[in-house]
Structure formats: C-alpha cells, structure tokens
C-alpha cells in the first residue's frame, strides 16, 4: 500500500519519458501502481502526482473515471462477464448467474477467501464468440458452465498460473525503446520546423504550383483571346 | 467576456430574434445577446472563465450558414450575418428538457438551502423551465454535506456538475485541489482524501456555484437573501482594494461578495478579503474608551477620554510626540489625523508604515502603473516584492492570468520562489541584502557576471526579456523585513533606467497608499507634496522633516520621545525589531486608537475605540492610487466612532480646530491642499463607485542611498522573514473562520542545506543572529535557495523579530541543531 | 471452434474465401512475430512509400477512397488533408479502443497482425510529417498490448521504427499507450483527452476538431486500427487495384462481425457495397442462416449506436450511403442478428443500459437522460410501467436528440426518414445513440412494451 518500489520508479521514469507532456503518463502509471499493489492505493496516486507534476486531486479525478482502476482491494482474479447485447443473445446472463451461484457472491462482490471478484461487464470485443468472459483480462470464448467450473478449479490449483497473472498485471511484455533508436520525444512547444523528410515534398509541390499557375495563365489567355475574338467579330 | 471593453470601430451584425444587433468582433454569442437585451439562460458559463459548453442550458437555434440548429451560444463567437432564434419552439423545448434533466437528481432542499432566493437554478427554472417534473424514480444520494476545507462545505446532491468550481480552482486560482471524480451519473466533485481544498481563493467557488452545493461556513444558515441589505464598498483587507458588496441583516454584517471591477479584481476575492469581516463583528471589539487606572484598562466616558488624551497631546513638545500607524484608516480619517499632527500639534513625527514598507518618496515618486497596465498582454512583469499570492491575493490572480493567458513574461526577483514562480519565465533569487546589486546588473550594459548569487546566464536571459517588446512593469514591495528598505529602494532606482518602465506598488497593508497620499510620512504633506512645499497652509506646519517609525521607536526607547499615538497599529507584532518596539512602548506614554486590544495596547494608557470600515463612510486608495468609496452598512458597536471624528475632537481638546464636521468638509480641505485629488469629492466618489478615480501626481524621487551590500559570512545564512496570507494579525485572529489558519512558524531551508543538518522534518533548531536567538522546527523547501533561512512573519507562536536589528542591510543567522 | 481452453489469440475469424486485404496473415498463428511478417510481405508497403515523396503517398490514399473504419466512415485521405500547413508538431493517434457492442475486428488485427498495423502507422506518419504516433489500445485487451509491445520491440530493433527508419531520414517514435476501461474514450476527442492524462470526456467540435486542435493543442490525425491496417496493401498494390474491390463509392473490403442468432457467427472480410446483409446472414460463405427455427426479427446493422433494421432491409448493400438513407448507419461493421425469440423490450433495455453506464457525465442531457431512460425501461420491463411512460420515454429521448428521429420503422408509418446523423442537445453522439434502440424498438414493437404495462391506476415506485 505504497509508493513505487525502486524498480517500479525506474520504470515509471521510463514511461514518463515517452510522452511530450508528463501528465500523459498518469494512466500508464496508475496501471503500474495497480500492478504493484493489486489495486490503486492513495499513496501510489500521491506518488504519481509528484512524478507527473500535477495534484493528487487531478490524479484521482482521472483514476476514478476508468473502470479498470480499483481503488479498493479486489480478488486475486477479477472475472468480467459480458452481458451486452451479443452475449445476452447467446447466454451471457446465464453465465453470470452461474458464476454468482457457484461462487456465492453477487456481481461486484469478492469471495470471502479473496480469490475471485465477479463483474457484470460491458462489451469485451469478442461478440461472435459469445458467451465470453475475461479473467484478469485474459479471454475465454464460447465458454459453457462446465468449462467455467473447470477454469475456476484450474485457477485454484495453480494450473493456469502461467496463463493468468494476478490482478493488476496487464502486459507481461513491455515496450522498451533503446536509447540509440529513439527518434526523439520533445514537448510540442520546442518543435518548430517540419520533420526533415518532408523536404522531399518541395520539388513536387513546387512543380504542381507552377503547373497550376501555368494552367491559370493559359485559361486567362484563352478568356482574353475569346473576348478579343468576340470584339473583332462584332467590329 | 465583460462589459467594459472600449468600443472598436469594427462591429459584426447578427440577427437576434429578428432584430439586427451590433456585436463586437470575437464576442461570444451569449454575451452579444445579453448586451442586446436578450438573456440566454446558462449555468456553466462564467464571464471570467473559458467557456466549456457543458451544461447545455444556453442552447439556442443558430444559423451559422448551414441551416438552423441547436448550438451552445457560450461557445460560438459572433460572425457576420449569424441568425439566432432564442424563442423558437425547438429552443424552448431544449430549455425545458435541460432544466428537467437538471432537476431530476436535484434534492428538494430549497427550504434549507443557503442559495434559495439567489439561486440561478431556481430563477432559471421559473423563467425558462417546465412547470413540473415527470421524474418519479429514486434520486442520487450522497452524504451531505461534507467539509472540503475549513471554510467550504460541499453538498454533492445539490451539485449540477457545471464544473465552475473545479475550473475556477484550476484555471483562475492555480490550485486544482477539487476535481470531478467517477463517471456518468455517478460523477461528483471532491478532493483527494485528506487533502482539503485549502486554497486561498476557495471562497470564490461558493459565490460562483449556481446552486447551493458549495456553501461557506461563516454564512451557512445565517440569513436569506431577502433578509439582507447590501451596499457596494471596498475591501480593506489588503491594498488591492477589491470591490465588494457588504450584506447585513439586523445591523450585523453577514457576508461579503466579490464585485466585478474590470480594472481591479474581476469579481474575485481572496479568502482573507472575503471572510475577515468577522473580526468587525467580534465581541472582542472595544466598545467604550478605556483608560488605565491602577494597572488595568477601565471604561471611561468619551468626554473624559478625549479631554485626557487632548491634554496629553497638547502638553507634549511636538518634537517629543510621535504618531505611528494610519494604514487602517480611511482616506478622510488619514487626512484628519495628518492635519491634527502636522497642522495643529505641529509635529512631523508621523509614519503610517511600521518599518516594514518602503520610503514614501520612493513609492510616490516612481512612475505608477495601474493593474491593467502591469497585466498588459505580452508585457514584462518584474516581481521585486513580496509574494502576491500571500499578500495581495486578487492581484495575484490578475498577474497569473496575464502570464498564462495573455503572454506576459514574469521575472521573479525575490528572495525565494513565490506563488507566481510556477508562471514565471525567469527566477532570480538574489541573496538578501544584495538585491540592489542584482537590479543594477539587470540594467547594466556590460556583459553580465554572476551577481548576488544569481548566475550570469540567468541575468542575461532576464535582460533579454526586459528589452523585448511590450511594456515593463515592476511590482515593487518589501519581500522581507530582514532586508533593509534602503536596499530595495536602491534596486528600484536602478530599474528606473528601463525605458518606459512603470511601478506597481506592492505595499500590502490595507490603505497604506491612502496614508501616503494624505502625507502620513515624515517630510510629506497631503497630495504627494513635501513639507518643504508648504502647500498645506496650516497654522503650525513644522519646517523640518520628522522621524520615521524606526526613529520614533528608537527615540522612545532612549527616552527622547515621550508620547506615542498608535493609529490602528501594533508595532510589537509588526515592527521588524520586536525588542526595540517593546522597549519603546514600555518607555513612552502610549495612546491607541483601535478596534481591538493588541500586544501593543498592553502598554497603552488610553484606548479610543474606532469604527470599522463597514461602520463608517469614507474612501480607500489602492496600490494603483485608485480611490474608491467605502460605504457604511451597520452601526459601530457601543460608542465607537469614525477615526476622523476622533481626530476632530482631539484637535479641539488640544486647543485647535480641524474645521471638519462632515466628509464633505474633509474633501473640501483635501481639494484645497492637494491638486492630485482635484475633482474628487463625495459626489464624484458616489458616481464612480465601481471603478473609482485614479489619483495622479508624483514627487521627486529620492537619491539612491548607495547602501553597501551585506557582508558575506561564509558560515551564515541570510534570514528572510516574509508575510503569509494567514498569520496572527489582529483582524485574522478575531475572525473565527480564519483564526486557526496561520501555519505556525517554521524555518525553511533548501533541501541540500536541510540534509546537511542531518535532522528529520520538524526537528528543533536554534537560529541565532547578532541580536538574539530563537528555537524553531525546520523543514526542507524546494522554493528556498541555498544559503537562505526563510521564516514566515507574525505567526503568533514564536517571535522572530528578536533576530532582526532594524537598519541592518541584511540579517545573518546561524542555524544549529537544537541540541547543540 | 475453440472451447474452454484459454485462447492464444482472438478467435472468431472465418475465412469466407473472399479477398484478403487486411486478414491475409490470419492463417498464421505467429503473424505477430516479425519473422513471419517479413516472410509474408510485411513492411513492403513502407519500403515502397519511402521511395516516393510524402505527398505522393497521401495522393494514393486519397485516390483509393479509403473510408474510415471506426464508425464515421469519413475518407481517410480527405481527413488527412485537414491539418493546417506549417503547424508543427503533428501527431498520429491510433484509435484501438474498440468497445462498441457488436464490434469485433480491431482486436483481431492487433492480436494477430500487429506488424501490419505498425506498418500502416508508419506510412501515415511518413505521408503527413507526423512526429510521433501513439497506439492507444483498449485497457482490457491485455494480449493485444503484449503482442503490440513485442512487435514494437522487434520493429525498433530492426530499424523499422524510431530513428532513421531503414536507414532513411524518416524518423518517428511509436509509443504503445493503454486505456483503462471507458467506452466513451473511443470518441476521438475523448481519446485525445485520455491520452493527455485526463478524464476521457469529449471536447466540443467546433472548435476542437483534432486535425486543427488535437493532442496537446496540436494538429492530430486520429485513425482507426482497421483503417491504418489497409495502408500496407494499398501501397504495395496501388489505389486502382484497391478500387477493384467493393463498390465505386465504397471501395475495398471490411471486416464485418456478425453475432447473435446465426448459425456461424464470426468475423468476415467482405467487399463493401457489393455484399448485402442477406449475403452475410444467409450466405454459405458467411453465417449460413439463422441459428434455430425462429425467423429474423430485427438486426442492428452497425454497432449498438445504430438504429435497428428489420427483415425488409435485409437486401440493402453493406455501404454507408444506402444504409444511411434507410435510416441507420453502417458504423463499425458490427451486425447483431436477433430472431423472433428475442424480447424487444429486453434488448432495448440492455443497449440503453450500456450507454447509461458509459456516459462520461460531462453534459446534462446524456448524464441525466440516459440513466432516466434506463430506469424507466427497467421499470417497464419489470412490470411496473405506468400509462404514459412510453410517451414520456419518447419525449426524454427527444430532449436528448430532438426532432423526428430517423428510423427504419418510420417507413411503416409512411413518414420519410430524415438523413442521419440526428440532431443532438449533447456534446457527442453517445446520448443520441441511446435513443436509437428506443425509437427502433418502441415504434416497431410498441405492443410488446404495452403488454408489460399493467392497466392500473396506482403504481408502486420501484427503487432502482
């Protein structure tokens, strides 16, 4: 229930460095805090405020907008069951009910042993594979009640430990940008000129402008010629 | 955004409800319609903040060229030929709909809600809304109300989520401590847990909240708007002179509200300006004259008091008589006392400043800027004075706006970082005692060198900013009482060489500028003229300049000054050298004219109770020299009376006659002696209530004193003692809502200096100077430069003034672990 | 199809033996690895683009009439042209926040062929001079984040992203950013707000059109994952080849997700404009007809925000204009089929509930109105409706989205449909989206609603 550990602090600095403005790192850092503690703690939010140079009120304001950030402890395994329209048509609600009965909690609640939290979730983007659910944001498609029971017991026995990390861990592979390969990330006010490769446009745009000018001149000539011809004709 | 822009030649023609209307280019449609007489209802829009188009109440049918459609009029700048229909069926249906939506989760609190009667939601529902709501479901519920700071309460059920308060906190005040949280229907305004909304400007959110969601503790449940009488007046809490309304019921002032004065405060008030009126209602007010007999102060009659004091004054040799204070008085009272002292009693030992300001000739001699001029878009502002956020709150908001919105460049030339530091482009922190050397370096033409602890690069960069386009204004005041006024004066004089430079005074104590204008300084007469000019034509005008406060106190301590008249002044709390002040007042006969007993009145033989600003008409001169009316709203307690009447009676008792029986008399006399105040009288003050009248006129500038920079001592820190908004000052101490907000005294050191001590935060250290030592808790602060020991002034717990010897260019101190 | 085993990646794609512009690598399980991508033509489009001037790349995209795949269907080439000249830096923000109910395609592309997406981003950045690209991936898509992170790491290593790409003067950083669970963030200005670290609340347009004032106030192009995934193929094969597929006004292919009561729900890459809904629902190469014995009752043609269609619209082509003229939207290519067993009230309630839960709360009509709609519908569904509730529901909907609402059901009543999009009292289209199911269901199946409302004179008020 804490500020970032030294390792995470180093990671936090790296994350912040990827953005032209520090505040952009707030959401990734909230994920990092949740990964560290299992949920987003007040201390983590205060630390994030310091690192991104905003107030803690701004951090909690952002944090509480988004569903994935839990500001209170949740189960080790958060089960999101989609009940939106495509899944509702194909057994999503029944799946949720089954889980509620099996685990003896209502959606939103956590089992007494702290293992599972169930959530009645919105569309998980697996609509053709209904009914679907996620456990700690790892997908299960076209899952039957029996299969759900199998998953729960596999989790309990540790069989799925490699597949499903504990709550808070999202990506187990992180983006890293080696310093030598970085194109360069700068605050917008420091960038004044066009990127260098845009210079390749110059000859083409110049040619087009010239062609357009020539075309307009030709059209203007034609117009004057026509008028002159008319006048001659009238004379 | 507001009403008083100058008329420009170009105008844009739009059609509002079938009528052609001339609008200003770039004006928002909602404003253009309002100016033309068509009010469009709104909640989230506020003229002094950026529009956000969130509440959707201002939707009207607008044709911007592609056919009529509902659009938020607060987000649309006018364009030639734009057509608006604010009365169409579609517009009205939208208005009905939005109001119905707003009311569905709004509790039926009107009978118990402070806002009832002055509530935009009520008013607009009546004028623009449906007669009934069709909502029969359960409303949203929250615990109600919750305190989000010591002064402000939040009722989330009433909140219509217009976002005005959070936008004010972030955009105007720069203190984003409240924020939207949650999402959708569950959105609420709140603080971070255990981090209250302790902004110096929190009270403004209560005023701008369009419902009763935000209420102020000092006013909760005290009255209803229809109980209140009100008058427009001027705040005296600091020298900005913000425009306010004073609202009272049954002869008690219950509330101040900010009034939008375009040249001054834009409707905003600092919390000190807003809530410190409570002191005036305090039971601790002195209500009868008091005289000391047998060690205690006993009430006496006015007749007896005036007679006794008059005698004392009459029988004191003018050269052994001193008058200290006057900044708390109205202009008229200041004139009266000046005339009493310099015209009747014949003494020039008059000083309204308490050794914590700047020489009057400097302030009055420098070319003056108005706030608008200082905040000119694209201009340069050199802050060489106290932290405006702490001492001149409404001015801070103007300066911040200039930097953030109008491209003004701020250069800090301060002993440590200030509240403007975040918005400043340059941060120069000269060592105390060496500010003059830095100022000279800023205007010199030779290549810059490291000076006064500031790098050559920083100086060069600042020079470039000063030389840039746009006017240059210096905000000039006394940042620290541990650095002598002479150093700052010399610094200011160096800066006069900047072409076209103007100065905006940052002296902060109430009506100190009125006092200077009325001659309450040695060597001066009313109207920004000198004793030598003899313009006053008074019977007993002295011919040689008298003593300053420091000199008077020294003389009293030495026994060469017998009698001191304190006018709303408390030297023991405010004079930098506390020991000297104590010795002086202990030695002399002290007479006080004041609202409260203070540390200084403990030495008084007599106290005459004065009326507070809301209890007597008068006028106030702000730091621009702008004179605005102060209006009486309630009667003074007991037999307290206006200062100028006290002055007139004392004059009589001392054998003279001020010739004053009314404020009109006062102004007639001022006009006679002061060309600077020509044309100002009670009538013109009435006619110019909102924006006042700016006094012009300057003195000759004094010469530089050429004071040497302080001698560097390798083992020492330089002391900085600066004012905070909340301290143990008398007015705040007697305002229940504000009394406990003083932070307490602590020593702030740069983190590296702090680490060198090897102590925890809050550990006791001993700070010693040549004149004394004190024990203080120590804290690290990123705002304090290396080698500087920063302490807030007058927090009431620990007396720091023992460290200071007045007149020293700077104060060197040692800082040692408390146990050594 | 896959059973209870944790699926290694997004399932659901079905090869319908049609042209494969964006799904060509789906046949491989490891297309997210650079090795496989390169072996199957990955980054060839980028290489070709680098041989041209940036403006020529832009021309090709414009010629190809590549329509945006995010839901609005605006031509990408024209959107690219909205950036004001000379205002640097400019940014590319990739909208990978797929959350529209029924929509399921971007996740497939991100998990199965991230290199194609990265390549598309690079082509766009090259064409327009965009200094940095932010790949905003929906927070709940953990695997997509991992795959993209891995792909970016490989790409940086191979000099395909970052400084001096492929040894040229083209340099751009692509940063993976992840969301945290909010549907509204899929709206382009809300996406930008979220990327700035704020609450994801949309900005008003005007003035905050991203191409003019976007990320950090700079001109910003926001493109959908699928849109950008089309770019490599277009660069390699050219605009004319691209226009051979689909119809003249809507060339190319799209990934359509058909879910609900069909035999073979799935994600299919099909030609726009020439394929009809009937082909998708009943075609042998596609969903092979209704799931059970029940007939088609209604279907959502383009994601939960779209007004419903009915059997009489089944022959419409999958093309934005005719679908729009018929009173709905093609949107994000998400088609939800509902048969006769579906309770119209329940389906309507579920969609409205979605919008109420996802409302950002910024503007009054959506924040208050959508919840009121949901509460009302629930009360009706639970049997506690009152007479007059249906009219009130329609009026609340009208206060969110005024004027006669376009809906296919109007035809039955002989009223002309009004061109989409509807008017709105709100800041963004989420509020009006909640109105779509209400007007669709209520006007077509009013009897089902009325059947639930008891004809009593007093009603107990339900606590919600």
Image (cartoon, helix red, strand yellow):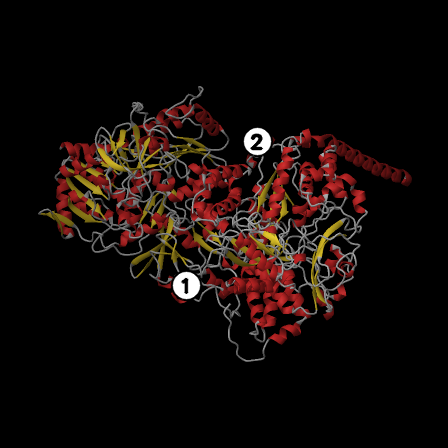
Name which quarter of the figure residue C434 lies in: bottom right
**Residue at the location (61% across, 75% down)?**
C452
Residue B509 is at least partly visible in this image: yes
Which mark identifies residue B116? 1
What residue is rendered at 20% in x and 43% in y? B599
Res C359 visible:
no
Q: Output the chain of dot 1.
A: B
In this view, the residue farthest toward the left is B294
Residue B331 % position (x, y): 30, 44
Whether callout 2 and callout 1 share a subunit is answered no
Cα distance, mark 2 to mark 1? 61 Å
Which residue is outermost to the top?
A: B446
> Between residues C347 and B351, which one lies in front from this camera angle?
C347
> Percent x, y for residue C139?
57, 49
The chain identifier of the residue carrying mark 2 reads A
Q: Going 76% across and 31% down the picture, which residue do you hit?
A: A207
Q: Is residue A229 above or below residue B192?
A: above
Judging depth in this view, the residue of B185 and C462 nearest the camera is C462
Dot label at residue A97: none
Residue where numbered disc 2 is placed: A179
Locate the N terminus of chain C and report the quarter of the image it occupies: bottom right
Location of residue B568 (image quadrant)? top left
Q: Horizontal placement of C272 versus A191: left or right?
A: right
Residue B690: % across, % down: 40, 49
Determine the secondary structure under disc 2.
helix
Q: Secondary structure at mark 1?
A: loop
Q: Position of residue B247 (x, y in %)?
A: 35, 57
How many numbered circles are shown? 2
């Amino acid at each position: 229930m804490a500020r970032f550990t030294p390792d995470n602090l180093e990671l936090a600095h790296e994350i912040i460095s990827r953005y032209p403005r520090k505040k952009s790192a707030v959401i990734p850092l909230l994920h990092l805090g949740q990964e560290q503690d299992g949920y987003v703690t007040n201390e983590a939010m205060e630390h994030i405020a310091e690192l991104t140079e905003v107030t803690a009120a701004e951090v909690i304001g952002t944090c509480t907008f988004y569903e994935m950030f839990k500001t209170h402890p949740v189960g080790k395994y958060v089960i999101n069951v989609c009940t939106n329209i495509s899944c509702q048509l194909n057994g999503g609600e029944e799946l949720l009910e089954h889980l509620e009965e099996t685990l003896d909690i209502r959606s939103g609640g956590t089992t007494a042993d702290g293992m599972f939290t169930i959530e009645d979730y919105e569309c998980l983007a697996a609509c053709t594979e209904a009914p679907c659910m996620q456990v700690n944001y790892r997908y299960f498609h076209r899952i039957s009640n029996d299969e759900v029971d199998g998953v729960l017991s596999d989790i309990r026995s540790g069989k799925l430990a490699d597949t499903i990390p504990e709550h808070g861990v999202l990506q187990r592979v992180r983006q890293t940008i080696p310093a030598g390969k970085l194109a360069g990330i700068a605050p917008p006010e420091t960038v004044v000129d066009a990127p260098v490769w845009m210079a390749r446009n110059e000859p083409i745009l110049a040619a087009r402008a010239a062609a357009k000018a020539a075309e307009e001149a030709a059209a203007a000539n034609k117009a004057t010629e026509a008028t002159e011809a008319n006048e001659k004709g009238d004379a | 955004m507001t009403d008083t822009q100058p008329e420009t030649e170009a105008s844009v023609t739009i059609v509002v409800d079938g009528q052609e209307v001339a609008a200003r280019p770039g004006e928002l449609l909602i404003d253009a319609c309002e100016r033309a007489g068509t009010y469009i209802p709104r909640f989230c829009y506020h003229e002094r903040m950026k529009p956000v188009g969130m509440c959707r109440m201002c939707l009207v049918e607008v044709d911007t060229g592609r056919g009529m459609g509902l659009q938020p009029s607060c987000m649309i700048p006018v364009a030639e030929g734009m057509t608006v229909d604010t009365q169409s069926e579609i517009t009205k249906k939208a208005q009905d709909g939005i109001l119905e939506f707003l009311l569905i989760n709004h509790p039926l609190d009107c009978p118990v809600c402070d806002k009832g009667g002055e509530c935009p939601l009520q008013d607009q529902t009546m004028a623009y809304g449906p007669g009934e709501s069709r909502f029969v479901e359960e409303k949203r519920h929250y615990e109600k109300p919750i305190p989000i700071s010591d002064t402000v309460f939040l009722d989330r059920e009433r909140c219509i989520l217009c976002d005005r308060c959070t936008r004010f906190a972030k955009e105007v005040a720069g203190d984003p401590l409240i924020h939207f949280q949650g999402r959708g229907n569950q959105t609420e305004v709140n603080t971070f847990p255990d981090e209250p909304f302790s902004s110096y400007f929190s009270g403004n959110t209560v005023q701008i909240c369009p419902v009763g969601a935000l209420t102020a503790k000092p006013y909760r449940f005290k009255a209803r708007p229809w109980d209140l009488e009100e008058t427009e007046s001027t705040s005296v809490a600091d020298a900005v002179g913000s425009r306010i309304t004073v609202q009272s019921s049954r002869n008690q002032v219950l509330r101040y509200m900010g009034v939008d004065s375009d040249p001054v405060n834009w409707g905003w008030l600092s919390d000190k300006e807003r809530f410190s009126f409570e002191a005036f209602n305090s039971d601790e007010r002195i209500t009868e004259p008091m005289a000391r007999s047998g060690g205690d102060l006993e009430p006496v009659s006015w007749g007896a008091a005036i007679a006794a004091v008059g005698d004392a004054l009459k029988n004191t040799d003018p050269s052994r008589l001193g008058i200290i204070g006057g900044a708390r008085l109205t202009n008229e009272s200041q004139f009266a006392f000046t005339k009493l002292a310099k015209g009747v009693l014949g003494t020039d030992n008059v000083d309204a400043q308490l050794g914590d300001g700047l020489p009057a000739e400097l302030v009055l001699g420098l070319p003056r800027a108005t706030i608008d001029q200082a905040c000119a878009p694209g201009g340069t502002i050199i802050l060489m004075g106290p932290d405006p956020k702490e001492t001149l709150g409404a001015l801070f908001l103007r300066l911040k706006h200039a930097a953030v919105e109008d491209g003004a460049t701020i250069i800090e030339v301060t002993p440590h970082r200030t509240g403007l530091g975040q918005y400043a482009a340059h941060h120069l922190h000269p060592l105390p005692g060496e500010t003059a050397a830095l100022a000279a370096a800023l205007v010199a033409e030779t290549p810059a060198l490291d000076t006064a602890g500031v790098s050559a690069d920083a100086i060069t960069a600042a020079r470039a900013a000063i030389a840039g386009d746009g006017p240059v204004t210096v905000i000039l005041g006394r940042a620290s009482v541990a650095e002598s006024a002479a150093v700052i004066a010399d610094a200011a004089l160096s800066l006069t060489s900047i072409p076209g430079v103007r100065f905006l005074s940052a002296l902060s104590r109430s009506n100190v500028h009125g006092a200077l204008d009325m001659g309450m300084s040695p060597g001066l007469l009313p109207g920004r003229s000198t004793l030598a000019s003899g313009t006053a034509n008074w019977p007993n005008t002295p011919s040689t300049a008298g003593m300053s406060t420091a000199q008077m106190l020294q003389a009293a301590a030495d026994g060469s000054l017998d009698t001191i008249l304190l006018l709303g002044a408390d030297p023991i709390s405010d004079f930098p050298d506390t020991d000297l002040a104590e010795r002086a007042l202990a030695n002399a006969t002290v007479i006080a004219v004041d609202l409260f007993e203070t540390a200084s009145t403990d030495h008084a033989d007599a106290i005459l109770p004065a009326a507070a600003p809301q209890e007597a008409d008068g006028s106030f001169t702000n730091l621009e020299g702008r004179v605005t009316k102060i209006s009486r709203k309630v009667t003074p307690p007991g037999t307290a009376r206006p200062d100028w009447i006290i002055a007139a009676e004392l004059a009589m008792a001392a054998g003279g006659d001020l010739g004053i029986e009314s404020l009109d008399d006062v102004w007639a006399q001022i006009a006679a002696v002061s060309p600077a105040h020509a044309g100002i009288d009670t009538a013109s003050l009435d006619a110019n209530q909102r924006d006042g009248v700016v006094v012009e006129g300057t003195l000759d500038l004094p010469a530089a004193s050429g004071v040497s920079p302080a001698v560097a001592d390798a083992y020492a820190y330089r002391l900085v003692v600066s004012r905070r908004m909340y301290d143990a000052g008398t007015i705040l101490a007697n305002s229940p809502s504000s009394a406990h907000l003083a932070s307490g005294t602590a020593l702030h050191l740069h983190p590296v200096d702090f680490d060198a001590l090897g102590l925890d935060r809050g550990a006791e250290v001993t700070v010693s100077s040549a004149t004394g030592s004190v024990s203080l808790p120590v804290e690290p602060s990123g705002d304090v430069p290396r080698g500087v020991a920063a302490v807030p002034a007058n927090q009431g717990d620990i007396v720091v003034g023992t460290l200071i010897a007045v007149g020293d260019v700077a104060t060197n101190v040692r800082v040692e672990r408390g146990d050594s | 199809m896959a059973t209870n085993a944790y699926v290694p990646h997004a399932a659901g794609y079905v090869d319908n033996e049609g042209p494969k512009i964006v799904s060509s690598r789906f046949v491989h399980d490891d297309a997210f690895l650079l090795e496989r991508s390169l072996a199957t033509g990955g980054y060839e489009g980028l290489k070709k683009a680098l041989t041209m001037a940036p403006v020529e790349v832009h021309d090709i995209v414009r010629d190809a009439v590549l329509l945006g795949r995010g839901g609005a269907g605006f031509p990408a080439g024209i959107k690219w042209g909205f950036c004001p000249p000379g205002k640097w830096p400019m940014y590319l923000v990739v909208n990978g926040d797929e959350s529209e109910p029924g929509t399921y395609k971007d996740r497939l592309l991100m998990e199965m062929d991230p290199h194609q997406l990265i390549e598309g981003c690079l082509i766009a950045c090259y064409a327009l001079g965009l200094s940095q690209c932010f790949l905003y991936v929906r927070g709940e898509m953990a695997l997509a984040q991992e795959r993209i992170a891995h792909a970016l790491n490989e790409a940086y290593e191979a000099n395909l992203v970052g400084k001096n790409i492929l040894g040229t003067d083209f340099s751009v950083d692509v940063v993976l950013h992840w969301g945290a669970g909010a549907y509204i963030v899929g709206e382009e200005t809300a996406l930008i707000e979220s990327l700035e670290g704020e609450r994801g609340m949309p900005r008003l347009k005007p003035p905050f059109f991203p191409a003019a004032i976007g990320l950090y106030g700079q001109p910003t192009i926001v493109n959908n994952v699928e849109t950008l995934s089309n770019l490599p193929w277009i660069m390699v094969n050219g605009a004319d080849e691209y226009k051979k597929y689909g119809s003249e006004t809507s060339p190319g292919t799209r990934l359509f997700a058909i879910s609900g009561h069909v035999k073979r729900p799935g994600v299919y890459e099909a030609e726009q404009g020439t394929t009809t809904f009937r082909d998708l629902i009943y075609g042998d190469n596609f969903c092979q007809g209704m799931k059970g014995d029940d007939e088609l009752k209604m279907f959502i043609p383009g994601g939960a925000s779209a007004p419903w269609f009915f059997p009489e619209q089944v022959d419409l082509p999958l093309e934005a204009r005719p679908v729009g003229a018929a009173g709905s939207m093609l949107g994000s290519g998400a088609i939800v089929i509902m048969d006769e067993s579906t309770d119209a009230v329940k389906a309507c309630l579920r969609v409205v509930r979605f919008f109420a839960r996802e409302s950002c709360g910024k503007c009054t009509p959506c924040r208050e109105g959508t919840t009121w709609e949901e509460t009302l519908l629930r009360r009706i569904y639970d049997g506690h409706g009152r007479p007059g509730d249906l009219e009130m529901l329609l009026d609340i909907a009208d206060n969110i989205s005024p004027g006669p609402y376009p809906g296919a059901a109007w035809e039955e009543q002989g009223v002309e449909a009004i061109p989409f999009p509807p008017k709105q009292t709100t800041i963004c289209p989420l509020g009006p989206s909640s109105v779509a199911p209400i007007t669709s269901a209520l006007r077509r199946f009013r009897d089902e609603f009325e059947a639930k409302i008891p004809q009593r004179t007093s009603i107990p008020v339900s606590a919600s």
